[in-house]
């Protein structure tokens, strides 16, 4: 069965880590709009050039740019066959309404973590510049900041600076929280406590998603 999932959570809530696991469990491709944009920036594509200044400043990329990127990706054969796990989209009510015009959503999950915890997690977060795998200062790759999965260089994200993080959290509160509420009103939202080990959070997530899908 093709499952169509959305994953919400503040920056540093563990969305990236959990998305990789959920994507394996449900067989749905993990589509991270942040990873897609970072790849576009690295390849200096027209979209990357347009998105970069917004991203570096911790601001949202304009809706019309995002909608083009996501609609094109969701039309690809792997999505048509296996569904999707959308991570980082939609982030505004305009994006949610537009998504509803070209895709069906089965369930949206919100990983809830208090702000003081995400601030601490983001300052120690490190990420592979090639494949996006997430590490931390406490849990680095095995060898010399070289990704265990793909051999890429593991670095701090350009927008994980304190100023950009503050802006991203503010945008989350003003734009993305109303989007989450929009899915709650539609009866599609499940909330999961994001504190604890990655295994504990994964177990809670799959239990909540399975219960929702079985309704
Ligand atoms: P993320 O890796 O999900 O934190 O995304 C990194 C940055 O990419 C964000 O701070 C935004 O600048 C941009 N971005 C990613 N997804 C979206 C979206 N759905 N709408 C607007 N901007 C986005």
Image (tube, rainbow, N blue to C red):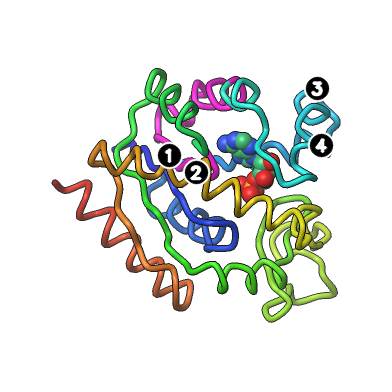
**SS state under label 2:** helix
Q: Do the CB atoms of the residues marked 3 and 4 lie less than 8 Å apart?
A: no
Question: Which residue is depicted at the point 65% across and 38% down?
Answer: 60
Q: In this rendering, is residue 82 above or below 194?
A: above
First-in-chain label (1 vs 4): 4
For disc 1, does the CB lie below 8 Å from ligand 1? no
Residue occupied by mark 4: 53
Residue identifier under label 3: 46
Mark closer to the observer (3, 1): 1
Q: CA distance from mark 3 to mark 4?
A: 13 Å
- Please say if the residues under marks 1 and 2 sit with CB atoms less than 8 Å apart: yes
The numbered mark, 4 or 2, whose residue comes first in the sequence reads 4
Circle 3 — which element?
Answer: helix
Residues packed near mark 3 inside 10 Å, few (<14), some (14 to 19) or many (20 plus) = few
Q: Is residue 55 magenta?
A: no
Q: Residue 189: x percent and y percent?
A: 30, 47
Q: Position of residue 204 (x, y in %)?
A: 32, 67
Which is more foreground, mark 3 or mark 4?
4
Identify residue for label 2: 176
Residue 35 at least partly seen: no
94 to the left or right of 121: left
Q: CA distance from mark 4 to mark 2?
A: 20 Å
According to the picture, the residue beneath numbered tag 1 turns out to be: 179
């Amino acid at each position: 069965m093709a499952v169509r999932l959305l994953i919400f959570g503040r920056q540093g809530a563990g969305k990236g880590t959990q998305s990789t696991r959920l994507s394996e469990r449900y067989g749905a491709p993990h589509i991270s709009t942040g990873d897609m944009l970072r790849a576009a920036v690295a390849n200096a594509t027209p979209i990357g050039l347009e998105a970069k200044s917004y991203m570096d400043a911790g601001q949202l990329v304009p809706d019309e740019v995002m909608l083009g990127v996501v609609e094109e990706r969701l039309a690809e054969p792997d999505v048509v066959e296996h569904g999707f796990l959308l991570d980082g989209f939609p982030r505004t009510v305009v994006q949610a309404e537009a998504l509803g015009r070209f895709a069906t959503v089965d369930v949206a999950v919100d990983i809830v973590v208090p702000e003081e915890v995400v601030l601490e997690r983001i300052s120690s977060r490190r990420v592979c510049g090639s494949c996006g795998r997430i590490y931390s200062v406490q849990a680095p790759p095995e060898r010399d900041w070289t990704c265990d999965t793909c051999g890429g260089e593991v670095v701090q994200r350009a927008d994980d600076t304190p100023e950009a993080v503050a802006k991203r959290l503010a945008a989350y509160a003003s734009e993305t929280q109303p989007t989450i509420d929009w899915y709650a009103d539609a009866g599609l939202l499940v909330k999961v406590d994001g504190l604890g080990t990655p295994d504990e959070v994964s177990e809670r997530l799959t239990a909540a998603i399975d219960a929702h899908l079985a309704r």
